[in-house]
């Protein structure tokens, strides 16, 4: 049986790529990991077989949707709202897992989505503004970190509900 983490890695790499934030090589490596972990499918094997040094977004795009379908992972159209929400959820899960700091999450959301591009990221963008006010309005980051973690949970739950 395949390692569920292989599916998560493939999903996350594909979501980042679809949002324009990923790397062609990361998709190929995630596909290789999925195959090594026992997942299978023609398109997945084709994706994993792309040459790392020479693969382009077009090469990845040719196989990605079908490769994800091979293993039951949701595909997000490039630069779509679904891809943006999926990437935000990926980063929120990393914060909840402790591999991305709350400060890095809200800074990412503000930098990538601003205040208006993605409604799901608006609260994090506002929290980034609050972090900038530390020393003026706020005296420490613990309360802000807790707010970011709570928002990360809300984002993960909301995206999971939408399926």
Image (spheres, helix red, strand yellow):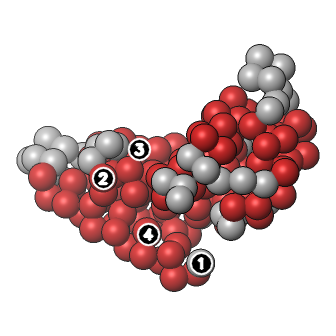
> Judging from the image, what secondary structure is the residue with disc 3 in?
helix
Visible residue check, residue 122:
yes
Residue 149 on image: x %, y %: 27, 61
Q: Quadrant of residue 87?
A: bottom right
Visible residue check, residue 117:
no
Q: On residue 97, which mark appears?
A: 2
Location of residue 49 with respect to 3 vertically, above or below: above
State which mark lies toward you, 2 or 4: 2
Q: Nearer the viewer, residue 159 or 38?
A: 38
Query: The C terminus appears in which quarter of the rendering?
Result: bottom right
Name the side, left or right, on which 147 lies relative to 140: right
Name the residue tied to disc 1: 163
Precedes in sequence: disc 4 or disc 1? 4
Q: On residue 155, which mark appears?
A: 4
Residue 9 on image: x %, y %: 54, 48
| Label 3 to label 1: alpha-carbon separation | 26 Å
Precedes in sequence: disc 2 or disc 4? 2
Badge 1: few (under 14), some or many (20 or more) residues near its Cα, within 10 Å?
few
User: What residue sits 40% from the left and 65% below the top?
Assistant: 123
| Label 2 to label 3: alpha-carbon separation | 17 Å
Name the residue tied to disc 3: 107
């Amino acid at each position: 049986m395949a390692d569920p983490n292989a599916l998560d890695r493939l999903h996350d790499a594909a979501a980042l790529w679809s949002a324009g934030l990923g790397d062609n090589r990361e998709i190929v490596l995630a596909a290789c990991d999925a195959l090594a972990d026992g997942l299978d499918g023609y398109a997945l094997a084709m994706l994993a077989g792309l040459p790392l040094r020479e693969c382009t977004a077009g090469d990845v795009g040719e196989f990605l949707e079908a490769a994800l379908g091979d293993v039951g992972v949701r595909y997000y159209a490039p630069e779509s709202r679904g891809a943006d929400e999926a990437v935000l959820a990926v980063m929120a899960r990393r914060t909840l897992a402790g591999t991305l700091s709350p400060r890095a999450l809200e800074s990412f959301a503000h930098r990538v989505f601003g205040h208006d591009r993605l409604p799901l990221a608006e609260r994090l963008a506002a929290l980034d503004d609050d972090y900038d006010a530390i020393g003026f309005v706020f005296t420490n980051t613990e309360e802000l970190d807790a707010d970011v973690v709570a928002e990360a949970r809300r984002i993960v739950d909301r995206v999971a509900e939408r399926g």
